[in-house]
């Protein structure tokens, strides 16, 4: 439970930032209610790629991409997280699918190191959370619970020993694939090889259950989703995916899978990625990728020419606008098919190059919450979306791990 002093600290911080930004809660009663609800339960964001920004743009040097103060070159910083009422953040320790073998393992270790160093650098604002109780305690202290999410099973190099060590270092979910297949599971955006999970892939899921790691099904094929739901003993998550019925993108969740979630207990954390939100934005992304490929074929060794050509194309083909309301439509759809207990937020901030209007950075989460209130969601329903659903999933995964604790670790597949 939040202490009175911690609550006052967070309320003052949020109010001060609202004044600085020119925002007046009195102008929008739904936004005022949304901000209050963000202070009542820890709001989970399922996916933030700031750690990769530190690696890619700052050479792993946190000081060069310091988030102590408001930045203009990232979607993430501490003052805006406070303004956005973020209570629990899954920090992605993404590494590209192009990395394989030991290179992927090493890069993932380095990304986990960035998260641990980030938490140590900002101890007044962040604390590592390993359990649901940790999340609630840290939130009650007025800090942001920081959890580690691995993005892509290539990170373990088909080693259950590596998986176990990542769990000991604090990883609390793993996305089974990224953009490419792994040797034991099919990706949503690659040519199918396995028809879902292999026998070893099933062992990976069971071992994650035994370890208390959440199985993340963002990025996996529909066949892999079905196999996971058949094998897992704990609720699953989609850390940053939306509804395929509203935007027919392979990264989104099909209705048939949404209908299975109540039995499993899992949660879809709706993404803010424009190309996952509307068909128009998805079509624009496809056209932009095709133009980029065409320019690279024309000028294979001239990066500047490709960049200039793509900029000209974008100027002639403006990106379709995506709105907060259209993101809320995906929350509505998950709620309609799976139920209010099975939906949350998964922004993908700092992992995307464009955002919906009104959801530009980590300060804007209350705008989406206000939209849900405007649509008639009760305060209890909103609290479930913000954090109660994820806390329940974490507790269920922890209970599953406790039941499986006496089981011997799974064995690696022969190499």
Image (cartoon, grey):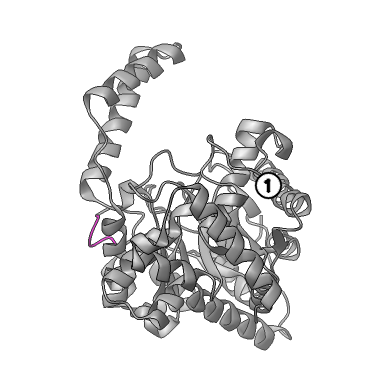
Determine the main secondary structure of the stretch shown in magenta: loop
Placement of 29 over or under 81, stated as above or below: below
Q: Which residue is rendered at x = 72% and y = 45% of the image?
A: 110
Q: Magenta stretch containing residue 275, yes or no?
A: no
Q: Quadrant of residue 311?
A: top left
Q: Which residue is rendered at x = 21% and y = 44% of the image?
A: 280
Q: Quadrant of residue 242?
A: bottom left
Q: Which residue is mark 1?
A: 111
Placement of 175 over or under 191, stated as above or below: below
Circle 1 residues within 10 Å: few <14, some 14–19, many ≥20: many
Q: Which residue is rendered at x = 36% and y = 54% of the image?
A: 251
In the picture, the quarter occupied by the N terminus is bottom right
Residue 189: give x, y in percent of width and height: 38, 48
Residue 200: give x, y in percent of width and height: 57, 65
Closer to us: 104 or 90: 90
Residue 45 in view: yes
Residue 287: give x, y in percent of width and height: 25, 33
Label 1: state its secondary structure. helix
Q: Which residue is rendered at x = 64% and y = 80% of the image?
A: 398
- Left of 289 or right of it: where is 362? right
In the picture, the quarter occupied by the C terminus is bottom right
* Span colored in magenta: 243-247
């Amino acid at each position: 439970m939040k202490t009175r002093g911690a609550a006052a600290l967070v309320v003052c911080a949020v109010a001060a930032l609202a004044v600085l930004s020119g925002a007046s809660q009195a102008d929008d009663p739904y936004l005022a209610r949304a901000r209050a609800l963000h202070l009542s339960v820890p709001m989970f964001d399922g996916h933030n790629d700031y750690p990769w920004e530190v690696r890619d743009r700052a050479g792993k040097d946190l000081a060069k991409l310091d988030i102590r103060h408001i930045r203009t070159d990232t979607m993430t910083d501490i003052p805006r997280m406070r303004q956005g009422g973020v209570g629990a953040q899954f920090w992605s320790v993404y590494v590209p699918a192009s990395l394989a073998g030991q290179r992927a393992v090493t890069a993932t270790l380095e990304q986990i190191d960035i998260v641990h160093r980030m938490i140590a650098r900002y101890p007044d604002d962040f604390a590592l959370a390993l359990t649901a109780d940790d999340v609630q305690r840290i939130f009650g202290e007025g800090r942001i619970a920081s959890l580690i999410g691995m993005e892509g099973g290539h990170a373990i190099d088909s080693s259950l020993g590596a998986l176990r060590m990542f769990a000991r270092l604090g990883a609390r979910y793993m996305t089974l694939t990224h953009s490419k297949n792994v040797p034991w599971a099919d990706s949503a955006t690659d040519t199918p090889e396995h028809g879902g999970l292999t026998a070893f892939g099933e062992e990976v899921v069971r071992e994650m259950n035994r370890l208390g790691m959440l199985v993340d099904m963002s990025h996996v094929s529909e066949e892999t989703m079905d196999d996971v739901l058949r094998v897992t003993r704990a609720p699953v998550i989609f850390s940053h995916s939306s509804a395929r019925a509203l935007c027919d993108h392979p990264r989104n969740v099909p209705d048939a899978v949404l209908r299975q979630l109540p039995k499993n207990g899992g949660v879809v954390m709706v993404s803010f990625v424009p190309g996952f939100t509307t068909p128009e934005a998805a079509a624009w992304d496809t056209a932009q990728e095709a133009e980029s490929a065409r320019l690279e074929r024309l000028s294979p060794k001239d990066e500047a020419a490709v960049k200039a050509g793509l900029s000209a194309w974008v100027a002639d083909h403006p990106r379709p606008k995506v709105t907060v309301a259209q993101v809320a439509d995906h929350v509505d759809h998950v709620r309609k098919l799976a139920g209010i207990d099975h939906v949350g937020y998964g922004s993908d901030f700092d992992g995307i190059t464009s955002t919906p209007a009104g959801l530009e950075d980590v300060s804007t989460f209350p705008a989406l919450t206000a939209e849900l209130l405007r649509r008639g969601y009760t305060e209890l329903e909103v609290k479930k979306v913000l954090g109660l659903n994820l806390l329940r999933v974490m507790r269920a995964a922890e209970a599953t791990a406790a039941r499986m604790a006496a089981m011997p670790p799974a064995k690696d597949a022969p190499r």
